[in-house]
């Protein structure tokens, strides 16, 4: 079409596989792992990321991220590791943002040195913090904004600028924002990565990852990916397309709910701190307004000492104490026990990820019901609080 499509139209229609035989309204599912190789447009094979369903979903994700091309993987960590290993080799160096998903931190600190790749973590999220760590052999700058679990906001324009100045590839984990709330490539970032398990999947029933970028960079990642073999089964790809169709609607509802829940928690007498970029009190609020279309469905908070956080979590009746995030149902987790369990305790403390921190993935339920559940759980948490002697 001559005019750019709206987000929900992209979610619904771009990349759909046409059912030319029966004219069905949705993409047919091609489960075959064996395709003809003679007299065909291209040789298709699931590990080559080019089955009809794989290609269709990749086109949809590319359109949502304003990218030329995309690839989908078997998990978020598959997307992260494939992207990093496509641009790093022995003797190279990578600069990473201090606040990152624990799985990324674990991959970097336990795997890269095996391949002769060195790394540095910043001491903050300002552009000077990144520039300070750049070496002559730095090839990649890797960021995450909003970050997991403290919702730190990093300046996309500034990081893209410093990366281009030094001829470095910039990558971002855009999972917390989703393409609905933030499009990093529009700010000059080179490669956008997602755990598609989260907002793209949105129903807590599939595991997937995605990378979006220019055709040149995606080709470079593809060259690595066909060797590492992190492809996704077509049945899961088909489910991912189903989920992407409603992502705009789901994320909009989660944005609205999270802003209301953050405001409620920030005013509550039982709560010590709330981390949510939609609050004016958040240190990155103004920057978030500049580079995000909305503030997302994720927040974190800490209870005051007289409230037992473990009892609070066990007392929830509607909100699920469950791992992962971004499903239509609200969930809460302790990052030190889940997403950042593999990060050393001293590093968690240094970053401000304390034992009492609770990460809240806000779903699409009615806010008054979520508030009621939190209130009753706080009553139990207070009655079981630990008294210091």
Image (tube, rainbow, N blue to C red):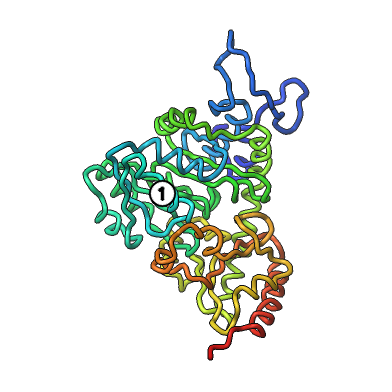
Residue nearest the viewer, comparing 109 with 225: 109
Point out residue 338 in the picture as x, y percentages from the top left corner: 56, 59
- 128 lies above or below 49: below
Q: Which residue is at the far top?
A: 39
- 363 lies above or below 171: below
Q: Is residue 139 left or right of residue 180?
A: left
Instruction: Report the residue at 53% width, 70% height from top.
Output: 357
Instruction: Report the residue at 58% width, 43% height from top.
Output: 6
Residue nearest the viewer, comparing 247 with 100: 100
Report the quarter where the N terminus lies.
Answer: top right
Q: Residues within 10 Å of mark 1 (few under 14, many from 20)?
A: few
Point out residue 122 in the picture as x, y percentages from the top left corner: 32, 58
- 35 lies above or below 87: above
Task: Give the structural element (helix, strand or loop) at label 1.
Answer: helix
Instruction: Report the residue at 59% width, 84% height from top.
Output: 386
Point out residue 10 in the picture as x, y percentages from the top left corner: 60, 40
Which picture quadrant has residue 127? bottom left
Q: Which residue is at the far bottom?
A: 389
Which picture quadrant has residue 153? bottom left
Q: Which residue is at the far left?
A: 136
Instruction: Report the residue at 68% width, 34% height from top.
Output: 235
User: Mark 1 highlights which residue?
Assistant: 110
Residue nearest the viewer, comparing 350 with 176: 350
Which picture quadrant has residue 123? bottom left
Point out residue 162 in the picture as x, y percentages from the top left corner: 28, 49
């Amino acid at each position: 079409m001559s005019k750019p499509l709206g987000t929900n139209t992209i979610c619904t229609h771009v990349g759909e596989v046409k059912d030319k035989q029966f004219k069905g309204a949705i993409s047919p599912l091609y489960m075959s792992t064996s395709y003809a190789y003679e007299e065909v447009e291209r040789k298709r094979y699931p590990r080559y990321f080019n089955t009809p369903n794989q290609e269709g979903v990749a086109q949809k994700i590319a359109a949502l991220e304003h990218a030329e091309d995309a690839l989908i993987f078997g998990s978020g960590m598959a997307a992260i590791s494939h992207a990093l290993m496509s641009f790093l080799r022995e003797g190279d160096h990578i600069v990473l943002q201090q606040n990152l998903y624990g799985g990324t931190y674990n991959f970097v600190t336990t795997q890269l040195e095996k391949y002769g790749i060195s790394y540095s973590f910043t001491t903050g999220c300002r552009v000077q913090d990144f520039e300070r760590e750049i070496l002559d052999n730095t090839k990649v700058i890797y960021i995450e904004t909003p970050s997991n679990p403290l919702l730190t906001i990093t300046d996309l324009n500034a990081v893209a600028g410093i990366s281009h100045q030094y001829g470095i590839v910039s990558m971002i984990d855009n999972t917390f924002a989703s393409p609905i709330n933030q499009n990093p490539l529009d700010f000059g970032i080179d490669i956008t990565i997602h755990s598609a398990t989260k907002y793209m999947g949105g129903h807590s029933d599939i595991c997937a990852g995605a990378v979006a970028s220019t055709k040149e960079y995606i080709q470079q990642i593809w060259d690595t990916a066909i060797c590492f073999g992190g492809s996704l089964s077509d049945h899961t790809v088909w489910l991912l397309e189903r989920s992407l169709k409603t992502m705009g609607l789901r994320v909009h509802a989660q944005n609205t709910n999270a802003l209301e829940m953050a405001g409620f928690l920030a005013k509550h007498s039982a709560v010590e701190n709330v981390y949510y970029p939609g609050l004016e009190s958040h240190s990155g609020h103004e920057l978030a307004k500049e580079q995000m279309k909305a503030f997302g469905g994720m927040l974190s908070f800490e209870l005051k000492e007289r409230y037992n956080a473990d009892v609070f979590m066990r007392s929830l009746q509607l909100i699920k104490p469950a791992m992962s995030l971004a499903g239509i149902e609200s969930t809460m987790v302790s990052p030190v026990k889940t997403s950042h369990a593999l990060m050393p305790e001293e590093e968690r403390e240094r970053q401000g990820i304390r034992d009492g921190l609770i990460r809240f993935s806000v779903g699409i339920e009615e806010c008054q019901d979520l508030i009621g559940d939190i209130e009753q759980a706080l009553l139990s948490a207070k009655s079981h609080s630990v008294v210091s002697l």
